[in-house]
Image (cartoon, helix red, strand yellow):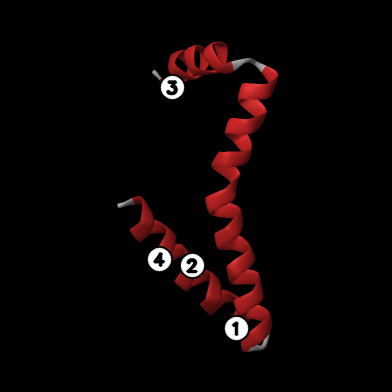
C-alpha cells in the first residue's frame, strides 16, 4: 500500500511540474527522479544517523517507545 501512495504522489508531482509550473518534460523527470531517490534513501540515512548518534540498541528501544 505504501508504494501505491508513492506512485500516486509521483504522478501528481509530474502533473504539477508540467502543468502548473510549466517545466519541460526532461526537467520534470529529473526532479521526479531526485524525489524518488530521496524517498528511498532517507530511511537509510536516518538509520545511519540514529545508530551512530544513539547507538545500536538505544535507538531501537527509544524508537519503539516513540512509535507506540
Q: Secondary structure at mark 4?
A: helix
Measured Cα–Cα span from mark 2 to mark 1? 12 Å
Q: In the figure, 54 relative to 38: above or below?
A: above
Mark 1, residues whose alpha carbon is within 10 Å: few (<14), some, or many (≥20)? some
Please state which of residues 27 and 18 is positioned toward the viewer in this rendering: 27
Instruction: Please give the residue where the numbered disc 3 appears in the rendered image.
Output: 67
Residue 6 placement (x, y as % from top left): 43, 59
- In this rendering, the count of numbered labels is 4
Instruction: Please give the residue where the numbered disc 4 appears in the rendered image.
Output: 8
Q: In the figure, 68 relative to 2: above or below?
A: above
Instruction: Please give the residue where the numbered disc 1 appears in the rendered image.
Output: 18
Mark in the foreground, 3 or 1 = 3
Mark 2, residues whose alpha carbon is within 10 Å: few (<14), some, or many (≥20)? some
Query: Decide: marks 2, 4 in contact (CB < 8 A)?
Result: yes
Q: Residue at x 61, y 87 (%)?
A: 25
Residue 28 placement (x, y as % from top left): 63, 79
Mark 4, residues whose alpha carbon is within 10 Å: few (<14), some, or many (≥20)? few
Q: Is residue 21 visible?
A: no
Query: Decide: marks 4, 3 in contact (CB < 8 A)?
Result: no
Amino acid at each position: 500500500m505504501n508504494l501505491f501512495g508513492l506512485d500516486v504522489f509521483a504522478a501528481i508531482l509530474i502533473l504539477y511540474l508540467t502543468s502548473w509550473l510549466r517545466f519541460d518534460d526532461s526537467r520534470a523527470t529529473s526532479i521526479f527522479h531526485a524525489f524518488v531517490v530521496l524517498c528511498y534513501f532517507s530511511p537509510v540515512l536516518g538509520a545511519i544517523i540514529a545508530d551512530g548518534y544513539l547507538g545500536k540498541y538505544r535507538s531501537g528501544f527509544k524508537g519503539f517507545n516513540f512509535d507506540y
